[in-house]
Image (cartoon, helix red, strand yellow):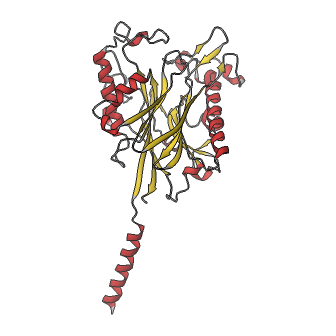
């Protein structure tokens, strides 16, 4: 009798565990700042002279090809610890033009993924744009638009932004460009893409917010405007569909704690704090732990972030939901020696690296039907 009872318990435990075993569809959503991803041809409309064979970077075909090969290696591997497929979506920044992207997706490590490209030229004077790559077999775009951020030099929403900064606070290649005619500050557009991921509507916004040129505090109002624009875009989507699933990602040039993210966008760092129509930022918790995607003077920060709307936090998994997030910082992406040991391995005159940023990513999952 005791033997039969023991067998019954084992049967019940086995049945319970079997019922809990479910199969899921997983998609990786990644963002990467490609850092100065220029071709070798001088474009007279933008400031790309340094990135030509005759420029200060001596940027020739051999270096360009190596840069693309390096980027392709990274992009093909992001998120593969949990999902063997490369990212379904890749948001990118610091991209010169469509041709660069066409050359990138033809790289041996990416060509079999059959990526589509959504890209617009932005008014940024360095000629660097944002773009979205997507796997055509997984995602079918239905609409896409570049939404400009209009800022003017005389706009200073916060008085504290007028405080002087120390010279090191403004060390950046991304110089703010101001029109002499109307004082407009030219920066990257925000790219909004809508489409169907395995039959389910998803909205994706790709960002590269204004830099910290001139100092963090002095330039903060511009990023706060970018955050407010991002929030406006999301609001418009949620007005059409209260259950709209929105992912916003990019190089924000701000941490998860800055006003542009916390106030302009209204992102929360804890899931339980996210209200209906709100935004969750999983990278706030990582920043609290001291992790980073970019380093400056031996201090780490997370400028690269992927955030999701509350509609992606339901946890029923009958539809696509947020699962978890990460920073892709494998050893081959890290400087091994010298002054910048431990930093992201970027390009120099003697070595073709990857980027001064680490990529970031999230997973979306849904029960298999």
Residue nearest the viewer, comparing 66 with 300: 66
- Residue shown at 41% from the left, 73% from the top: 16
**On screen, 366 above or below 101?**
below
Q: Residue furthest front?
A: 142
Residue 80, image x, y percentages: 34, 45
Q: Tell me where residue 30 sits by quadrant.
A: top left
Q: Tell me where residue 178 sits by quadrant.
A: top right
Viewport quadrant of the N terminus: bottom left
Residue nearest the viewer, comparing 353 with 189: 189
**On screen, 259 above or below 218?**
below
Q: Residue furthest bottom?
A: 1
**On screen, 324 above or below 11?**
above
Report the side of 84 relative to 327 (left or right): left
Q: Is residue 64 visible?
A: yes
- Residue shown at 35% from the left, 18% from the top: 348
Viewport quadrant of the C terminus: bottom left
Residue 181, image x, y percentages: 66, 8
Q: How many marks?
A: 0
- Residue shown at 36% from the left, 35% from the top: 75
Q: Is residue 341 visible?
A: no
């Amino acid at each position: 009798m005791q033997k039969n009872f023991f067998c019954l318990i084992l049967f019940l435990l086995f049945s319970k565990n079997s019922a809990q075993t479910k199969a899921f569809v997983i998609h990786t959503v990644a963002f990467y700042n490609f850092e100065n991803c220029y071709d070798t041809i001088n474009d007279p409309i933008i400031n790309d002279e340094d990135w030509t064979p005759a420029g200060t970077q001596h940027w020739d075909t051999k270096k360009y090809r190596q840069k693309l090969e390096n980027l392709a290696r990274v992009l093909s591997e992001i998120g593969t610890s949990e999902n063997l497929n490369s990212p379904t979506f890749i948001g990118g920044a610091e991209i010169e033009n469509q041709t660069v992207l066409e050359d990138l997706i033809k790289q041996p490590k990416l060509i079999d993924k059959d990526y589509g490209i959504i890209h617009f030229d932005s008014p940024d004077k360095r000629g660097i744009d944002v773009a979205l790559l997507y796997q055509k077999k997984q995602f079918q775009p239905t609409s896409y638009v570049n939404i400009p951020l209009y800022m003017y030099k005389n706009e200073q929403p916060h008085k504290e932004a007028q405080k002087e900064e120390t010279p090191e606070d403004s060390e950046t290649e991304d110089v703010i460009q101001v029109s002499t005619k109307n004082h407009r500050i030219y920066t990257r557009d925000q790219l909004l893409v809508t489409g169907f991921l395995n039959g389910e509507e998803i909205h994706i916004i790709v960002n590269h917010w204004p830099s910290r040129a001139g100092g963090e505090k002095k330039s903060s109002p511009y990023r706060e405007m970018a955050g407010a624009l991002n929030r406006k875009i999301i609001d418009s989507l949620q007005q059409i569909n209260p259950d709209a699933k929105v992912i916003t990602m990019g190089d924000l040039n701000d941490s998860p704690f800055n006003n542009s993210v916390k106030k302009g966008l209204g992102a929360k760092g804890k899931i339980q704090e996210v209200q209906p129509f709100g935004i969750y930022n999983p990278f706030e918790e990582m920043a609290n732990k001291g992790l980073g995607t970019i380093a400056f003077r031996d201090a780490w920060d997370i400028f690269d972030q992927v955030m999701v709307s509350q509609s992606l936090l339901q946890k029923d998994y009958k539809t696509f939901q947020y699962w978890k997030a990460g920073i892709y910082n494998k050893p081959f992406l890290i400087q091994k020696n010298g002054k910048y040991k431990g930093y992201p391995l970027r390009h120099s005159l003697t070595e073709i690296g990857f980027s001064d940023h680490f990529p970031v990513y999230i997973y979306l999952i849904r029960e298999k039907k």
